Amino acid sequence: MQIASSTRVLSDQDKANYHEFGYLSIDSFLSQKWLSLLKATAQEFVELSRTVTRSGKVFDIEPKHTADEPRIRRLNSPVDNHAVFEEFALAGPAAQLAIELLGSPVRFHHSKLNFKWADGGEEVKWHQDIQFWPHTDFTPLTIGIYLDDVSQDMGPMGVFPGSHNGPLHDLYAPDGSWAGAVNDHVLETLDMDEVKWLQGRAGSATVHNCCLMHGSMPNVGKRTRPLLLQTYSAGDSYPISGIGANGVTGAKSGTIIGGISRQRLEIEGRSMHGAPDWSRHGAPTIFGSQQKERN
Ligand SMILES: O=C(O)CCC(=O)C(=O)O
């Protein structure tokens, strides 16, 4: 898929900061046009959610959600649910930003819209992302877009600068079940004064590396905090199957943006030219390939 334009939004210093600290906070990232379009599209889903009584493929809703007073936790996979979100993530400003940071092409992984509703929208406990969807390298990053102004009481993204270069923590609970968050004994070692809270105006962007420790507090404010998130890796980085959410991240997962896949990868310092991607249409047998029936 081609990207829409190539307007530069990051300076070399921004890129250096991303690599050093593992995150960025970019004020006024979106044009008014994109912001209005994304807000209106998100609002369409708020209206649609009034017909929903339980969490499912499209919505994750709070137990208190009703038709009269919607309380959505998350719109799952926006790119699979609306053409505006698809264009934004696969060809628009988010794709462009990913390419600026990762080089072309990039590989799209997944998207989500975390609403964090007013008056108590839930916290996201401290975690790193890569354990949820391991890849063949640590290039994956997530771009977040605030669709409304976000102040400290609304539960902005919080990050530990530089933690992407630290340990990859165990996100299982002591009883062996998946917790999706670090344990208390890790929390006790963290200095909360180091956290940078990424408040921002509507249309500002956050970027965080897949190994960065991050989380957010409950929204105790009076306005909902919609954060549209989309994840990409470098084109030569591949999600590892058989672990975590890889394989269930949506129909557009794996889309290559800004070029074509080279099918090159490096594992344990050894590089190779891998076979074509047969995951969507089925693999030929070695006989068929060697007899040049198809590839
Ligand atoms: O919505 C947030 O505040 C954080 C989102 C996040 O960390 C995640 O979905 O992995």
Image (tube, rainbow, N blue to C red):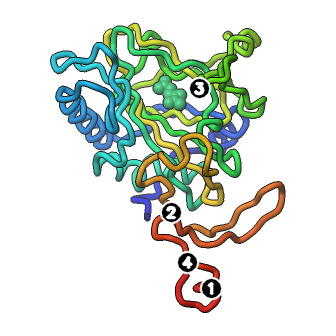
Residue that label 2 marks: 258
Query: Could you give the CA–CA distance between mark 2 and mark 4, rounded to whole angstroms?
Result: 27 Å
Of callouts 3 and 1, which one flags the residue occurring earlier in the amino acid sequence?
Answer: 3
Query: Could you give the CA–CA distance between mark 1 and mark 4, rounded to whole angstroms?
Result: 8 Å
Q: Which amino acid does label 1 sit on?
A: Phe
The label nearer to you, 2 versus 4, is: 4
Of callouts 1 and 2, which one flags the residue occurring earlier in the amino acid sequence?
Answer: 2
Describe the element under mark 3 as helix, strand or loop: loop
- Mark 3, Cα crowd under 10 Å, few <14 / some 14-19 / many 20+, is some
- Mark 4, Cα crowd under 10 Å, few <14 / some 14-19 / many 20+, is few
Looking at the image, which is closer to me, 219 or 200?
219
Residue that label 4 marks: 284
163, above or below 239, in the image: above
Cβ of mark 3 under 8 Å from ligand 1: the answer is no
Left or right side of 233 for 73? left
211, above or below 91, in the image: above
Left or right side of 19 for 31? left
At horizontal 71% and vertical 27% (from top left) the residue drawn is 170
Residue 179, image x and y in percent?
59, 22
Of callouts 4 and 3, which one flags the residue occurring earlier in the amino acid sequence?
Answer: 3
Q: Which amino acid does label 4 sit on?
A: Pro
At horizontal 51% and vertical 57% (from top left) the residue drawn is 254
Residue that label 1 marks: 287
At horizontal 62% and vertical 55% (from top left) the residue drawn is 238
Looking at the image, which is closer to me, 128 or 146?
128
Residue that label 3 marks: 180
Residue 270, image x and y in percent?
82, 62
160, above or below 164, in the image: above
Cβ of mark 4 under 8 Å from ligand 1: the answer is no
Looking at the image, which is closer to me, 56 or 128?
56
Q: Which image quadrant is residue 1 in? A: bottom left
